[in-house]
Image (cartoon, rainbow, N blue to C red):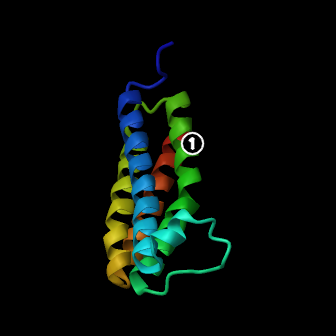
Amino acid sequence: MEPASANATHLVVVLCLSVVLLLFHILLQGFLATRELGSAWNAGPRDAELAPKSAKAGRAARASKNYQETYPAFIGLLLGLAFMGDPTGFGIGGAWVWLIARIAYVPLYLAGIPYIRSLVWMLSLAGLLIMMAALLF
């Protein structure tokens, strides 16, 4: 079975990198929470509603949640591009914009940098819109 798009290899690469970023979010959040609450908390059932109180751990958790909010849309659009094809290359360009913006978002959020972080988030949304436009037009 041949891929519908000549850019299929690029789509797989950006997909795999997006999963690496997802795992990074999960590991970063877990590391910062464990550093604060201890390894016994991490290894245990976490029945008690303990949450880390440090700013960095909270930011890591919110950044991870934010990533997970747009990730399903990204995956859906990426699958659409894989099935429908992307002869212009705009869709894969949008996917790279989304991924690069999401990577840049992490340190900006952890550092607590306002406005620029929001602009980078909007850039990631622009990447999704580019992907959508490539599918529709």
Taking the view exactly as shown, the residue that stands out farthest to the right is: 47
User: Vertical placement of 17 versus 54: above or below?
Assistant: above
Q: Is residue 123 visible in this depiction of the protein? A: yes
User: Vertical placement of 62 versus 84: above or below?
Assistant: below
In the picture, measured across the screen, residue 18 lies left or right of residue 137, that is left
Q: Nearer the viewer, residue 2 or 23?
A: 23
Q: Is residue 122 visible in this depiction of the protein? A: no
- Residue 32, how many percent across, how many down? 40, 73
Q: Nearer the viewer, residue 23 or 16?
A: 23
Quadrant hosting residue 108: bottom left
Quadrant hosting residue 15: top left
Mark 1 closeness class: few <14, some 14–19, many ≥20 residues within 10 Å: few
- Residue 91, how many percent across, how many down? 43, 42
In the picture, measured across the screen, residue 50 lies left or right of residue 53, that is right
- Residue 39, how many percent across, how many down? 45, 69
Residue at position x 44%, y 47% from top? 19
Residue at position x 49%, y 72% from top? 61
- Residue 97, how many percent across, how many down? 36, 54
Residue at position x 48%, y 62% from top? 125
User: Vertical placement of 135 versus 52: above or below?
Assistant: above
Residue at position x 47%, y 80% from top? 58
**What amino acid type should be assigned to the residue bearing mark 1?**
Leu
The residue identified by callout 1 is 136
Q: Nearer the viewer, residue 125 or 25?
A: 25
